Amino acid sequence: MTEHSDLAAIEARIATAAALAGRKPDEVTLIAVSKTHAADRIEPLLAAGHRDFGENRVAEAQDKWPALRARYPDARIHLIGQLQSNKAADAVALADAIHAVDRPSLVGALAKAMDTEDRRPSCFIQVNIGDEAQKGGCAIADLPALLAAARTADLPVVGLMCLPPADIEPAPYFALLAKLARDAGLAGLSMGMSADFETAVTIGATHVRVGSALFGDRG
């Protein structure tokens, strides 16, 4: 395993935040958000032993990951961006986890694709936790119905995901998502990014999505 100082630093910060909350570091999956970054930027992290990566767009992931996975077949791809229903089959064929399930039509498309592809990537329901018109995610009031639809369709829903409002203290939004997940009997919490992942870990995040702190700002 080779060294990657930024990766080690982020892992150390996750471990410290987890300890503050009485949690173990291995309860938190660090998703390295590799969207917009070319394979030659991603490979050093793979060589350092990291295996969980986040992509926004199916087409971009299809372009760069087959070659990377040929060398690192245990790499895991998390689709974290908004997903069009007509891309459901491609998403299911590629991804190990889909973090932005946000509407009944996508539930139906994913369920059909999983049956066809005979693959069942883990799914997170994205919640529009700050009720922001410009963001994806289902409204909090619509979450019970969407969860019921997903369960009826036999989607492997493992948790909830959110993007809190920018430039506002995120902790209340993370705490609300954690409560919604508890009420729904879901263990997974995909929340926290480069600026706030430590706060998310102390509140129970099981998956944090870190891009710029690992790769630098996107060009």
Image: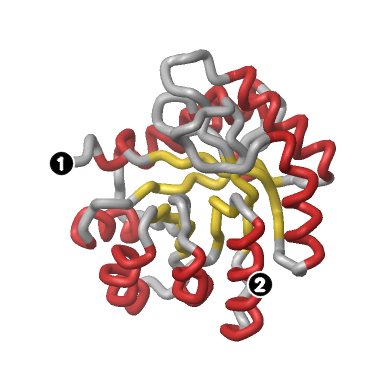
Q: Amino acid at mark 1?
A: Gly
Q: In the rendering, at what x and y percent does residue 51 appear? A: 44, 59
SS for dot 2: helix
Question: Mark 2 against mark 1, which lies toward the viewer?
Answer: 2
Mark on residue 13? none
Q: Amino acid at mark 2?
A: Ala
- Position of residue 145 relative to residue 119, above or below, is above
Question: Which residue corresponds to the image point at 30% horizontal and 36% vertical from the top-left?
Answer: 212
Front position in the image: 10 or 181: 181
Mark 1 — residue?
A: 219
Mark 2 — residue?
A: 111
Q: The N terminus is located in which quarter?
A: bottom left
Question: Which residue corresponds to the image point at 24% horizontal and 52% vertical from the top-left?
Answer: 37
Q: The C terminus is located in which quarter?
A: top left
Quarter of the rendering containing residue 67: bottom left
Q: How many marks?
A: 2
Mark 2 and mark 1 lie on one chain; the one further toward the N terminus is 2
Query: What residue occupies the far left of the structure in this picture?
Result: 219
